[in-house]
């Protein structure tokens, strides 16, 4: 039982390049989330998917797109990376979409944009 | 927008003492508040959830209080151990998820 897995663990991009961060969960959870974590800023929600087939914007969605491929997988795409997107990205999942549900986090992807 | 305040300065305490971490929030009152633990290089791990109608919640050596009048939650670790050293994040849950930036706890043997 791996929980939430993320690939890659580390990535360096040049400004303007694109990439997709992958996330998968094996807990049969309905809801999935993408966060970014910057020093002193805490975790900020980028996008979330309350259930398969739905996605919604979070606090900081600009510059990102997401795809809920199926119940297990939720990907985050950067179409044209910018240095301001240098951050640690976490994927999370929860059984339900309500704010009372605990979230399970992946190990994170450390992204540097030069 | 929501503002969540956690002490950015690290809290250093001696093993065996009680650690108390503070989470203050502004504007709306959350229906729930969660606490997470984060170790370096890892994702946060859920610890406790407290509801707005609960004053206190306990789990083993952990205790959380929730004062909706003061707009504050306190997180206590009793009989602290070096293994408790980590960053602790609070997440007052409004209609969406918001996290504080966390307080780093250092427990010295």
Image (cartoon, rainbow, N blue to C red):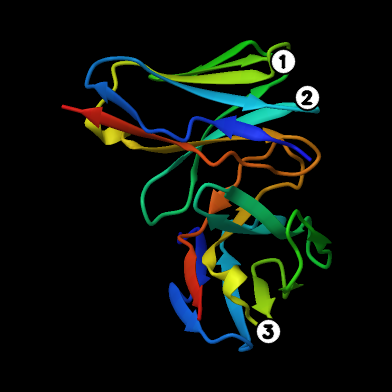
Relative depth, front residue between B105 and B63: B105
Query: What label does residue A19 carry, if any?
Result: none
Q: Name the residue under label 1.
A: B68
Image: A66 above or below A91:
below
Q: Quadrant of the N terminus of chain B?
A: top right
**Residue B81 picture location, percent across and down:** 25, 26
The crowding category of the residue bearing disc 1, from other C-alpha atoms within 10 Å (few below 14, some 14 to 19, many at least 20), is some
Distance from the alpha carbon under mark 1 to that under mark 2: 7 Å
Q: Name the residue under label 2.
A: B29
Circle 1/circle 2 CB separation < 8 Å: yes
**Residue B79 picture location, percent across and down:** 29, 16
Question: Element under label 2?
Answer: loop
Pinpoint the chain carrying mark 2.
B
Residue at x-position 67% and y-position 39%: A101
Classify residue B28 by image quadrant.
top right
Image: A81 above or below A60:
below
Residue at x-position 78% and y-position 64%: A52
Question: Element under label 3?
Answer: loop
| Left or right, A19 with reference to B40 | right
Image: A42 above or below A51:
above
Are the residues flagged by discs 1 and 2 from a single subunit?
Answer: yes
Instruction: Choose mark 3 or mark 2, whichever is in front.
Output: 3
Q: In which quarter of the image is the C terminus of chain B?
A: top left
**Residue A57 picture location, percent across and down:** 80, 60
Question: Element under label 1?
Answer: loop
Which of the two labelled residues, at mark 1 and mark 2, occupies the earlier sequence position?
A: 2
What is the tally of numbered marks visible in this picture?
3
| Left or right, B46 with reference to A52 | left
């Amino acid at each position: 039982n791996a929980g939430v897995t993320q690939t890659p663990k580390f990535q360096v991009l040049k400004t303007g390049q694109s990439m997709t961060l992958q996330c998968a969960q094996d807990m049969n959870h309905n809801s999935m989330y993408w966060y970014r974590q910057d020093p002193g800023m805490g975790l900020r929600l980028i996008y979330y998917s309350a259930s398969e087939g739905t996605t919604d914007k979070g606090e900081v969605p600009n510059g990102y797109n997401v795809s809920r491929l199926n119940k297990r997988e939720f990907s985050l795409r950067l179409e044209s990376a910018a240095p301001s997107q240098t951050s640690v990205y976490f994927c999370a999942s929860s059984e339900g979409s309500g704010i009372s549900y605990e979230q399970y986090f992946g190990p994170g992807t450390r992204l540097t944009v030069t | 927008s929501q503002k969540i305040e956690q002490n950015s300065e690290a809290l250093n305490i001696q093993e065996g003492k009680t650690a108390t971490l503070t989470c203050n929030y502004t504007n709306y009152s959350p229906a729930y508040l969660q606490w997470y633990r984060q170790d370096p290089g890892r994702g946060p791990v859920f610890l406790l959830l407290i509801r707005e109608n609960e004053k206190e919640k306990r789990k083993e050596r952990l205790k959380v209080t929730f004062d909706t009048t003061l707009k504050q939650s306190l997180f206590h670790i009793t009989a602290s151990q070096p293994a408790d050293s980590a960053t602790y994040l609070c997440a007052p849950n409004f209609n969406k998820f918001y996290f504080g930036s966390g307080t780093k706890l250092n427990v010295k043997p």
